[in-house]
Image (cartoon, grey):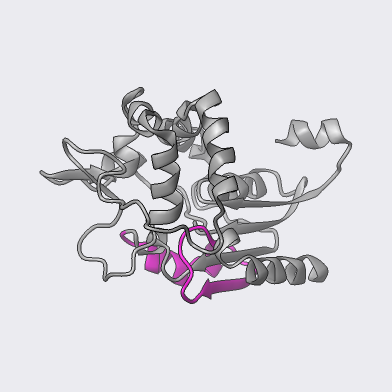
């Protein structure tokens, strides 16, 4: 990423990311505060390096495993997600919003099932999602497949190893964190404590926004609110 800044002739940048793009953004700011002067993270808060290998503590039950653990075996998730790419995006984008109370561990994949098993296909698309959007994603992922994105999860333990010298390190640049209050990510085990104590590890946290009625795809579902918060943050830098 720093190489990209160099190629573009950019000395410093503000980095933003959503979902696993948020840890990428957090760690870019952590590792190179000289090049990334601020960070904006959506959905996933900054989590300091854990004392144990991440996959070793991912929730596992007799009947289900955490989705990131399910993603570890090369080829398994690729086959499921690529079997019907249109259905994959209809479910992940349009059907993943959960309106009912969460009971038990969140983000679990049934053994013998798949990532999409418990995600219904929507009867109609939500207002923020168009058929043209689905068409675009389908064309692109039918061309590329899903392995590139899934490989991020397969490198979680390796990334943890590489960050051994950053135990206890804090993100020192200005930061903003935003999430929807219906995003299942914020309901992951222990995430409530991480979010509540975020300023301890991000001492220059300028804002922490939990958008009501908003799900995981915050930048699309609540585009005007997200854009307003980002612009306000940038103006204050």
Quadrant where the image shows the C terminus:
bottom right
Give 136 or 182, whichever is nearer the viewer.
Answer: 136
The answer to whether 61 appears left or right of 14 in the picture is left
The quarter of the picture where residue 196 lies is bottom left
**Residue 143: x %, y % from top left:** 55, 24
Quadrant where the image shows the N terminus:
top right
Q: Which residues are magenta?
A: 189-218
Residue drawn at the location 37% of the way across and 57% of the way down: 123
Give 120 or 111, whichever is nearer the viewer.
Answer: 120
Residue drawn at the location 76% of the way across and 31% of the way down: 3
**Residue 232: x %, y % from top left:** 75, 72
In reply to whether residue 200 is colored magenta, the answer given is yes
Give 64 or 87, whichever is nearer the viewer.
Answer: 87
The quarter of the picture where residue 202 lies is bottom right
The quarter of the picture where residue 71 lies is top left
Give 94 or 192, whichever is nearer the viewer.
Answer: 94
Considering every residue shown, the one lying at the far left of the view is 62
């Amino acid at each position: 990423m720093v190489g990209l800044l160099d190629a573009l002739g950019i000395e410093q940048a503000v980095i933003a990311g959503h979902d696993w793009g948020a840890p990428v953004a957090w760690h870019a700011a952590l590792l190179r505060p000289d090049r990334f002067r601020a960070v904006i993270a959506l959905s996933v808060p900054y989590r300091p390096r854990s004392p144990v290998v991440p996959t070793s503590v991912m929730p596992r039950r007799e009947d289900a495993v955490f989705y990131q653990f399910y993603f570890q075996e090369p080829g398994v998730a690729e086959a499921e997600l690529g079997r019907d790419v249109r259905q994959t995006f209809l479910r992940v984008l349009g059907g993943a919003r959960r309106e009912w109370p969460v009971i038990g561990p969140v983000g679990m994949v049934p053994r013998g099932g798949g990532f999409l098993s418990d995600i219904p296909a929507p009867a109609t698309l939500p207002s923020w999602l168009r058929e043209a959007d689905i068409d675009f994603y389908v064309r692109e992922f039918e061309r590329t497949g899903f392995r590139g994105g899934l490989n991020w999860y397969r490198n979680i333990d390796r990334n943890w190893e590489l960050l051994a010298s950053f135990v206890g390190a804090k993100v020192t640049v200005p930061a903003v964190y935003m999430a929807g209050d219906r995003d299942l990510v914020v309901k992951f085990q222990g995430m409530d404590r991480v979010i509540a104590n975020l300023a301890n590890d991000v001492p220059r946290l300028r804002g922490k926004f939990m958008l009501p009625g908003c799900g995981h795809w915050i930048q699309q579902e609540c585009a005007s609110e997200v854009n307003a918060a980002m612009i306000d943050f940038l103006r204050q830098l």
